[in-house]
Image: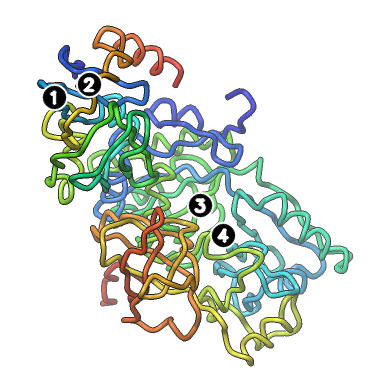
Amino acid sequence: MAELKKTPLYDMHVKYGGNVVDFGGWALSVHFPTGIINEHKTTRERAGLFDVSHMGEFRVKGKDPLGFIQKCVVNDIGKGVIGQCIYSPLCYPSGGAVDDLITYRLGEKEWLIVVNAANMEKDWAWMSDVLKGFPGTTMVNESYDTAELALQGPRAEEILQKLTQTDLKSIGYYHCRDNVTVAGSKTLVSRTGYTGEDGFEVFSAPQDAIALWEAMMTAGKPLGVIPIGLGARDTLRFEACMPLYGQELDAERTPLEAGLGRFVSFDKGDYIGREALWAQKEKGLQRKLVGIEMVGRGIPRHGYPVLDAEGKKEIGYVTTGSYCPSLERNLGCAYVPTAMAQVGQKLSVGIRGKAVEAVVVKKPFYKRVRPTKA
Amino acid sequence: MSGVSFPKEFKYTKTHEWIMVTGGTGRVGLTNYAQDHLGEIVFVELPEVGAMVKQGDTFGVVESVKAVSDCYAPASGKVTKVNEKLNDSPELINKDPHGEGWLFEMELASAGADLPSLMDQPAYEKFEAEAGAEH
């Protein structure tokens, strides 16, 4: 595996017994010794620690960082205050997605943009091109100079609090704080994640990553924390119906079709894709992303055809499908014609040449119970 | 699963299925190596009783959380019985791959004429060790 890129936490994958594979050119673990199902359940019930250092980070500063980012993204980040994180798709003029990302406002005129690892080069090239229209605004690619750990689960705050003087309760959901000292290292901490649980993402210098990982494992041991691989990362985000670029979103699918309309703003100025998205919204969607549950025996998977209830006509396709460990059901997300997108609509999934009965169900499949505010 | 040995009375395929022959009947399953590599099995698709299977052809699939894996028939014959317990408890394959996790039974074709092409236990042990070393 000499050619694979290693994150600053590679040695931890080896130490903790991860089965390291080639994940888009990175050496990462699909699972650790206890396996995907246990990792998934542990994250929902206690806490899980993830190496997500392969993600991309771009820092935007200078003359008009807000104007530049607003031109690129479909959501309105102008309403974000310092310390606020905002999720947004990034679209082509056609309205199809380039990627989805999270913007972190770190200062009056400073943002960190976190992008999917698989799209880092593409996003960099795309945004660099737009940047030409914003002389004086700067964007620096810090992806290879940044490590990222995610600590997720109901025990995550308790564990992380042991390692920092910063009152983590003061960092609300989809908010962040820069220069937080965690286990002696300076970090950016956000209450964000890709699991559907409460938790934090911690960005650090690469050389501090291992110490942070080990500190979290040690602090978390009495609370049951274990390392989590990519396999459970996918089942966790899927149960919570969080989109994955390349499956729910791609160049051919718009955020409106993907059910992400609340992240598409028509209240801000012009941005790439605005015209196409507005036209699609006005005309009405031809297809929609729905949740499906298998009624017959079988597991729906990415790319499987979706057929009508009689199993005769192909009407759509599965974007993600899996056995869901917390719900113990076989579920999927699929694009179907709008006319067939109602909850309760019967349809079928083509599995190895056979049409297996399924039904449209409500999304999200899993929603954590949030404690009510005192 | 350390310490799980490969039964002497089984014959083995290069694709990590086993067959236990009793007279003209064969009971088929996946070896410990297979279940270890697949991870937690969450779904099994078995052949229908009465179906004809051909040595080397796929007879069904096992699915882990992440992947679908074809299973290949160790011998040719007619399926006489399938392990219904696997519908609700596919994890039996992980827990007891050489026993409770058996997949199906069949009436061997041509009095088991295609059995000699399979590996016996010592040959499979060697094959499995080499396959393990590559991963």
Above or below, comparing residue A250 to residue B33 in the picture: below
At mark 4, the secondary structure is: loop
Number of the front mark, 4 or 3: 4
Q: Residue A274 carries which label?
A: none
Is there one chain holding both mark 4 and mark 2?
A: no
Q: Which mark is residue B24?
A: 1
The chain holding disc 1 is B
Q: Determine the CA span between mark 2 and mark 1.
A: 7 Å
Q: Determine the CA span between mark 4 and mark 2.
A: 51 Å
Labels 4 and 1 touching (C-beta < 8 A): no
Within 10 angstroms of label 4, few (less than 14), some, or many (20 or more) residues?
Answer: some
At mark 3, the secondary structure is: strand
Q: Which mark is residue A245?
A: 4
- The amino acid type found where label 3 is placed reads Val
Left or right: residue A114 compared with residue A331: right
Nearer-the-camera pick, A339 or B74: B74
Which residue bears the numbered disc 2? B112
**Residue at 37 percent of width and 28 percent of height:** A17
Left or right: residue B16 compared with residue A318: left
Q: Determine the CA span between mark 4 and mark 1.
A: 53 Å
At mark 1, the secondary structure is: loop
Q: Determine the CA span between mark 4 and mark 3.
A: 30 Å
- The amino acid type found where label 2 is placed reads Gly
- The amino acid type found where label 4 is placed reads Tyr
